[in-house]
Image (cartoon, helix red, strand yellow):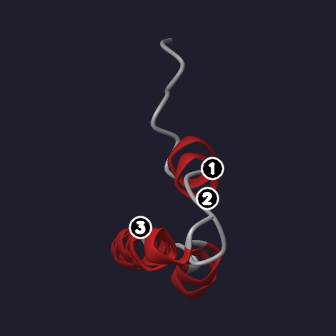
Amino acid sequence: MNKEYSLPVISMVAAILLVQSIYLFLDARKHNHNYWLWGIVGLIQAPMPTLFYLIFVRKIFHKKK
């Protein structure tokens, strides 16, 4: 990768991870989940922590009875 492209790419990735982490932290705190865990996990990678949080913790897909 060229040096001239590396700074914008790193900045974009850092912004995505930070926004994801803040969203997970605030939403988990709002719904009384382990918010520190989700905030830290959101800083590690994207988008899997958000998908796991929405599917397994928030359970956005409900079975119809």
Mark 3 element type? helix
Whether residue 13 is situated above or below residue 46 in the rendered picture: below
Amino acid type for the residue under numbered disc 3: Ile
Left or right relative to 11: residue 58: right
Alpha-carbon neighbours of circle 3 within 10 Å: few (<14), some, or many (≥20)? some
**Which disc, if any, is residue 52?**
1
Q: Distance from label 2 to label 1 (Cα)?
A: 5 Å
Query: In this orientation, which residue lies closer to the viewer: 51 or 14?
Result: 14
Across and down, in percent, residue 53 comes to 56, 55
Query: Which of the marked residues, 2 or 3, is nearer the chain's N terminus?
Result: 3
Return the residue found at the far top.
65
Residue 63 to residue 36: above or below: above
Q: Are marks 1 and 3 in contact (CB under 8 Å)?
A: no
The quadrant holding residue 1 is bottom right
Number of other residues with Cα within 10 Å of mark 1, as a class: few under 14, some 14 to 19, many 20 or more: few
Dot label at residue 49 = 2
